[in-house]
Image: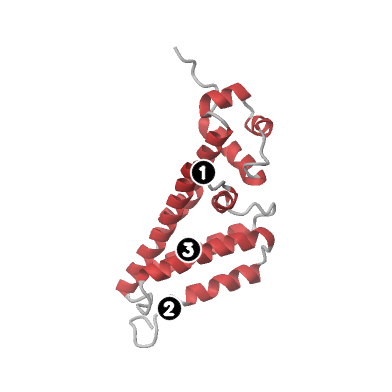
Amino acid sequence: MARPREFDEADVLDAAVRCFWGRGYEATSVRDLIGQTGITGASLYNAFGDKRALYRKALDHYVTGSVDDRIRRCGALPPREAIGAFFAEIVKRSLGDREHKGCMLVNAALEMAPDEAELRALVAGTLVRIETFFRDRVAAGQADGTITQALPADDLARHLLGMLMGVRVLARVRPERALLEGAVAPALALLAPRDGEAGA
């Protein structure tokens, strides 16, 4: 009969997220993880498998608590306001990131090896969800007249996704309000209805 776990999995994953997010996958050792999580190496391996498996679980935990949560909250707002709120939160988080950790999802995309199929699928799937959020909000805004119909919803969604990735990378090395807000502002202005469109 298996012994019950003597730790809370969510707490361990929170600690693993902090460790991997701050150091990156390659620079994080099992000793670092043991020190951060407070459980033994044997317990880590028994519960999560190897370091790579724990990293995937930690990244998924991060995505659920950060990206998916933001999509849910912002998705409850009116279309154009939802997109603005999404980017406002990204800028705020970036400016408050004193350790310059950036976004763990973007860090994973930049650090992963070319043959990491499972990790690539996790990152790509999350980016698709973000793009879908943008597309749904743009389409809803085009329907109610608050977002321009001059460009297809698909194109605007892809542009917003690209802008998001750029802002997150910029923030790693230049977390400056004027830079980040200046990068986001034209993308948001692009959504405004044009002359002759409803809401203009």
Q: Which mark is residue 192?
A: 2
Q: Position of residue 158 (x, y in %)?
A: 44, 66
Give amino acid for label 3. Answer: Leu
Residue drawn where x is 35% and y is 77% of the image: 149
Q: Position of residue 62 (x, y in %)?
A: 52, 45
For marks 2 and 1, give the CA distance: 40 Å
The quarter of the picture where residue 148 lies is bottom left
Q: Nearer the viewer, residue 77 or 155?
A: 155
Residue drawn where x is 49% and y is 62% of the image: 86
Q: Position of residue 33 (x, y in %)?
A: 64, 33
Image height check: is 140 above or below 21? Answer: below
User: Residue tagged by mark 1?
Assistant: 116
Q: Residue furthest bottom?
A: 196
For marks 3 and 1, give the CA distance: 22 Å
- 126 sits left or right of 96 in the view: left
Mark 2 or 1, nearer chain start = 1
Give amino acid for label 1. Answer: Glu
Q: Nearer the viewer, residue 18 or 121?
A: 121
- 110 sits left or right of 161 in the view: right
User: Residue tagged by mark 3?
Assistant: 161
